[in-house]
């Protein structure tokens, strides 16, 4: 079936969102039918089990569609963002009339928000040229920053490996999501209440930080 030419981001999002709306509506109907079948004092046990199985299956479809929508939005954000995962940047802000710079940072991901904007998910680089092992990620919003420019900060061997890792993760996820439609890009997880949800899994081995 594949390779085939994929639709533009906007059209893929439109189709997935349409499919998601229909699936949510169908799920509500399945719940209504289930409650209707079980409101009496007596019921058909096999019917109840089959209806429950149908609900579980559709719930799984809805959750998978939700993560697929978010992934296409992420891929669109990466496409339009001037800087990509694996790039190094400096952030300049004007504070009380003075230009102040922070960084350098290594971009590990580009994340969309619900307003059609995006943020760079970054980790600060050490003077030696590798990612800081502590301190966590920093989210940088281009619309909230005065200027974001490329950094020419040197990378040591570890830093080069980290930069290439995140670059390849972005490229691989694009291939799997946008070109091949590989559902295996996502894996089921359980939340604190024990319910399943889906997340995009790493497509490469975790970086040795």
Image (cartoon, rainbow, N blue to C red):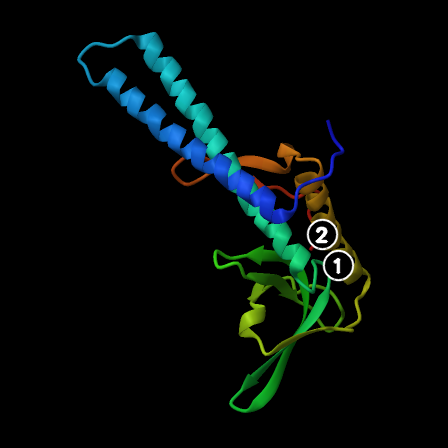
Res 30 quadrant in image: top left
Above or below, 171 relative to 92: above
Gap between marks 1 and 2, in whole Å? 12 Å
Above or below, 123 relative to 52: below
Work out whether mark 1 precedes mark 2 in sequence or the reverse, and give the earlier one: 1
| Residue hosting label 2 | 208
Q: Are marks 1 and 2 in contact (CB under 8 Å)?
A: no
Residue 25 drawn at (x, y percent): 38, 32
Q: Residue at x 66, y 40 (%)?
A: 177
Q: Pick whichever, 115 or 50, lies toward us.
A: 115
The quarter in which the C terminus is drawn is bottom right
Q: Residue at x 41, y 41 (%)?
A: 192
Residue 200 drawn at (x, y percent): 59, 42
Q: Residue at x 49, y 38 (%)?
A: 18
Res 182 quadrant in image: top right
| Residue hosting label 1 | 163
Residue 134 drawn at (x, y percent): 60, 63
In this rendering, which labeled residue sits more in front, label 1 or label 2? Answer: 1
User: Does residue 29 show up?
Assistant: yes
Q: Residue at x 37, y 20 (%)?
A: 52
């Amino acid at each position: 079936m594949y390779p085939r030419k994929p639709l533009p981001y906007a059209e893929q999002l439109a189709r997935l969102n349409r499919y998601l709306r229909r699936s949510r509506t169908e799920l509500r109907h399945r719940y209504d039918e289930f409650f209707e079948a079980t409101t009496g004092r007596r019921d058909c046990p096999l019917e109840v089990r089959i209806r429950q199985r149908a609900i579980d299956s559709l719930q799984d479809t809805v959750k998978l569609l939700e993560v697929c929508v978010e992934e296409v939005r992420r891929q669109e954000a990466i496409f339009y963002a001037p800087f990509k995962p694996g790039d190094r940047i400096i952030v300049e802000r004007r504070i009380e009339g003075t230009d102040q710079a922070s960084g350098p940072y290594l971009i590990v991901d580009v994340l969309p928000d619900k307003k059609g904007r995006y943020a760079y998910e970054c980790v600060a680089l050490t003077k030696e040229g590798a990612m800081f092992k502590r301190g966590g990620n920093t989210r940088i919003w281009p619309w909230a920053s005065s200027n974001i420019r490329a950094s020419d900060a040197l990378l040591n061997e570890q830093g080069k490996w980290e930069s290439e890792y995140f670059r390849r993760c972005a490229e691989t996820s694009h291939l799997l999501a946008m070109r091949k439609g590989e559902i295996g890009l996502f894996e089921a997880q359980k939340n604190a209440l024990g319910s399943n949800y889906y997340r995009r899994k790493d497509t490469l081995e975790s970086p040795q930080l």
